[in-house]
Image (spheres, rainbow, N blue to C red):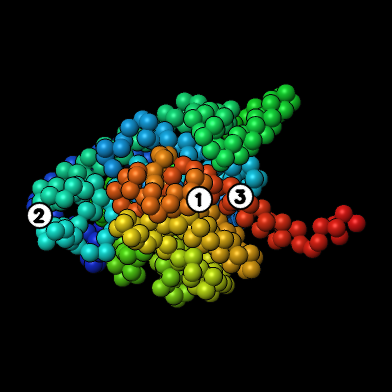
Amino acid sequence: MHAEHTVMSPDSWRRLPAAQQPDWPDPEALRAVVAELSDYPPLVFAGECDQLRSRLAQVTRGEAFVLQGGDCAETFREVTAEKVRDKIKTLLQMAAVLTYATSVPVVKIGRIAGQYSKPRSKPTEVRGGVELPVYRGDSVNGLEFTPESRRPDPERLKRMYHASAATLNLIRAFITGGYADLRQVHEWNRDFVASSPIGERYEDLAGAIDDALTFLAACGADPGEFHSAEFYSSHEALLLDYEAAFTRTDSRTALPYDVSAHMIWIGERTRRLDGAHVEFAARVRNPIGVKLGPGVSADEALALIDRLDPAREPGRLTFITRMGHDKVRDVLPGLVEKVTASGAQVVWLCDPMHGNTFEAPSGHKTRRFDDVLDEVRGFFEVHRALATHPGGIHIELTGEDVTECVGGGDHVAVSDLHQRYRTACDPRLNRYQSLDLAFQVAELYRERTTSVHQPGPRIASVA
Ligand code: PEP
Ligand code: MN
């Protein structure tokens, strides 16, 4: 069925235009680095990618919900046990809220352990009359505005690998070492309760989960699932030289996998049908995501399905829509309707971040929590009207108490943005805002199941 994967070389993308690639000053140095990377061990195993694909297939059947989240851009400096733990903690807390309230498994995917490369709207940046190459992520150059720092350096690709490996090692240690044990629901909240209403709300829910676990343990039920968690890595597959160096043939299936992450996605700026990114993704077996902005046509989406999921395999393809809160209700219905009518079974995720960015008077790039929530609400409304499954959310967040997005949880004001604005790229929800969002999304999901799966007035079913 997948014969074409082996017939075509995974290098076929090299013949096509690749958008958003750095202008490496020394191509020979790049070649040497890529050759070295090609011998590095894999970061993930093909079998794990297959397992994620089967989880995502559950999502297409409406049996599970996806939580995908993490930084817009990870940085090498922030690969510390504490920072990684706080991100994992935030995602685990959100997942606990969502699982408890929705009663479906939550597939947990980090934008983590490889999210180091950024597409940019302009190739250069001007400050005080000085023009330098734009920051393209720690995998390419430095954020500091100096000629040395902004010069693309392929040695950074090796640092990207090592930073990803160290991060994944921490995640695997936290997850298998007991940190993700459901008995830790209170522990994840320990530093949080006293200081916030959201922390208190979470504590109530953690208490309910604890009661349920105690009851089940008393009944003799203590399954392994309670003591660990499945956690997957993902990033935008932007730098094709790097991704190609980690494309390896799986010994079991003889098929190529990109072993730099479990799931990779193609961004809004690099998803052209005749471009290198789509060609690359078409040749690897990982679950693939594609970001779709408000300008996408249903025909383009259908053509992407033909290219990336010709076998119509549930779990293979995820569409991550990022329309903007003011457009989602207009643009999404036609798209979902036509894709559904084509028979394709894709996962639909809502990225309520990238269509809702604006510049504050202070110059900070920011997002309003209310706009983020409104896009998610619109996403749920559209799927409810079409009786399709709102498969999950894709969020930019951090475990830290940053002031990058306004509103939500602890009411960050526009005038507060300068206080702890730390992102290397786009503004992220802080931990309060992330948990606040999880509670609200859980409610939207419950409303959705109430009216779709149990139609008619409640009183009628009682009678
Ligand atoms: C991102 O996810 O950080 C990003 C650049 O998104 P998009 O491709 O949707 O603009
Ligand atoms: Mn971003």
x%, y% of residue 341?
Answer: 57, 72
Q: Earlier in the sequence, mark 2 or mark 3?
A: 2
Residue type marked 1: Gly
Label 1 – label 3 distance at C-alpha: 16 Å
Q: What residue lies at 51% left-to-right and 34% top-to-bottom?
A: 195
Foreground: disc 2 or disc 3: 3
Residue type marked 3: Ala
Q: What residue lies at 72% left-to-right and 60% top-to-bottom?
A: 451
Q: Does 213 sit above or below residue 409?
A: above
Mark drawn on residue 25: 2
Mark drawn on residue 408: 1
Residue type marked 2: Pro
**Which is more toward the observer, 355 or 33?**
355
For this orientation, the residue located farthest to the front is 415
Residue 203 makes an appearance in the image: yes
Under circle 2, the secondary element is: loop
Snapshot quadrant of residue 48? top left
Q: Is residue 185 left or right of residue 109?
A: right
Label 2 – label 3 distance at C-alpha: 49 Å
Label 1 – label 2 distance at C-alpha: 44 Å
